[in-house]
Amino acid sequence: MVSFLHKERLDTVVEALLACGASSVLDLGCGPGELLLLLAEHQQFRRLVGIDTCLDVLQEARTQLTHHQHLPDGQRLALYQGSFTECISDLQGFDAVALIETIEHIPPGRLSLLERAVFSGYAPQTVIITTPNSEYNPLHGMAPGQFRHPDHQFEWDRQKLRRWAQGVAGRSGYQVSFSDIGEVDMRLGGSSQMAFFWRAD
């Protein structure tokens, strides 16, 4: 069952990808294929590829996509097992890369590898990243320092995301904007946060 917040997050990303005119999307950390399933409903997207490290969730994604008549045939739609921190040369040339609630699962010391793979290796026109906003955690009833998922390696506040994303954009020739996702608290922001990158050229 997809939570209301996650549905809003997915819908926000789909709208952004439609608006930027992307026709090919690489979903890094695709999980059970929720974003791919939504994108596959739009004819604008002519090539969709999901990558995840876990074979079990890739099988779940394959089952869900096939159930909704979106068979991963290796042409319009494909699934790969792989790391988010390594660029797969066969998958270069995508218009957009999406990392939806993905970066927080990566050890901070490996974020430079992710940056190199995405912004220099794949080098799409558009990159969309969403990640939890740790400032909002008290509104979820969480204790200080508690993470939303046991596999999270970190959770950033809005200022930390902005500093990191602006550094990435400056080093890679992109511009970046930010938005809140979910019900917004005037002081704490939204439960999730999105960085939208586009190539400066």
Image (tube, helix red, strand yellow):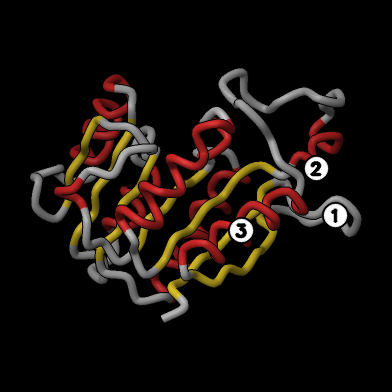
Q: Amino acid at mark 1?
A: Asp
Residue at 36% across / 56% down in the picture?
120
The residues bearing labels 1 and 3 have C-alpha atoms spaced at a distance of 27 Å
Q: Amino acid at mark 3?
A: Gly
* Label located before the other in sequence (2 or 1): 2
Decide which of 9, 115 is in the foreground and name it. Answer: 115
Decide which of 145, 123 is in the foreground and name it. Answer: 123
* Label located before the other in sequence (3 or 2): 2
Residue at 66% across / 48% down in the picture?
192
Q: Which mark is residue 185?
A: 1
Q: Amino acid at mark 2?
A: Tyr
The residues bearing labels 3 and 2 have C-alpha atoms spaced at a distance of 24 Å
Q: Are marks 2 and 1 in contact (CB under 8 Å)?
A: yes
Residue at 35% across / 76% down in the picture?
21
Decide which of 141, 67 is in the foreground and name it. Answer: 141
User: Would you say 42 lies left or right of 164 here?
Assistant: left
Check disc 1 and report its element: helix, strand or loop.
loop
User: Would you say 171 lies left or right of 89 here?
Assistant: right
| The C terminus - image quarter | bottom left
* Label located before the other in sequence (1 or 3): 3
Instruction: State the residue position of label 2.
Output: 136
Check disc 3 and report its element: helix, strand or loop.
helix
Q: Which mark is residue 167?
A: 3
Q: Which quadrant would residue 144 be assigned to in this image?
A: top right
**Which of pointers 3 and 2 indicates the residue nearer the eye?**
3
Residue 159 appears at what percent x and percent y?
77, 53
Residue 179 appears at what percent x and percent y?
66, 63
Q: Mark 1, residues whose alpha carbon is within 10 Å: few (<14), some, or many (≥20)?
A: few
